[in-house]
Image (cartoon, rainbow, N blue to C red):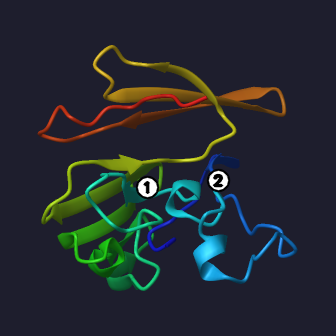
Amino acid sequence: IDSGNFILYAKGVRWIYDLGSDNYNAYNYFNNSWRYKLYRKNAEGQNLVFLTSQQVKVPYGLSTDGNGEIIDFYSGEYGSYSILDNTSSFGGFAVFARRGMMMTNNRETVVLQDEITFSSVESVCWLIHTRSTVNGISADGRTACLSHKSGGTTYFLRATIVSESDRYKFVELG
């Protein structure tokens, strides 16, 4: 369920959070059919793409049997990258699913890239969890600006959607 989940630190700020483990004493926690109904443990509680289509019968957004595999990586003085093949996490509804993360520009810029070809899916969602302030989303929905105050300094992060399709947009959820 959490294959491809990530956290992001930059300039000493944690911009994107992993919500962590849940309460092991929660009712039926170790029963998988119940545990994955808890927000922290299902796909919505992770920082990744998941299925939301009503036609898809993947009850938690991603397959509990899927296993991502790192298929390539590099780390050097000025940058690094890794690529995850996450096809099996979509329970047969994707014919190709890869997530790549690259640090470039002397490790000043992070690029997260999802490449997914679905076989028969109407709707997907991509969520992140942050404690930073969302300062605004551009009129076209393609750029979001966040800020974070720490030790008297305000840091800024700009996230941009780069896609040929105009279907993908940032939306702030309460």
Which quadrant is home to the C terminus? Answer: top right
What is the x, y in percent for residue 59? 44, 66
Name the one closer to the observer, 13 or 38. 38
Badge 2: how crowded within 10 Å, few (<14), some, or many (20+)? some
**Most extreme residue toward the right, as rendered?**
25
Name the one closer to the observer, 142 or 152. 142
Q: Is residue 105 above or below residue 5?
A: above
Q: Which mark is residue 137?
A: none
Which residue in the protein does label 1 denote? Answer: 106
**Most extreme residue toward the top, as rendered?**
139
Disc 2, SS: loop
Which residue in the protein does label 2 denote? Answer: 17
Q: Residue at x 74, y 69 (%)?
A: 21
Sequence-first tag of 2 and 1: 2
Name the one closer to the observer, 148 or 6. 6
Name the one closer to the observer, 49 or 8. 49
Q: Residue at x 22, y 61 (%)?
A: 115
Say what amino acid the circle numbered 1 marks.
Answer: Asn
Say what amino acid the circle numbered 2 marks.
Answer: Tyr
Horizontal arrangement in the rendering, residue 110 relative to residue 45 (left or right): left
How many numbered marks does the figure carry? Answer: 2
What is the x, y in percent for residue 142? 31, 28
Horizontal arrangement in the rendering, residue 73 relative to residue 15 (left or right): left
Badge 1: how crowded within 10 Å, few (<14), some, or many (20+)? few
Rounded to the nearest angstrom, the CA distance separating label 2 from label 1 is 23 Å
Q: Residue at x 32, y 32 (%)?
A: 169
The image quadrant of residue 92 is: bottom left
Horizontal arrangement in the rendering, residue 142 relative to residue 1 (left or right): left
What is the x, y in percent for residue 100? 33, 66
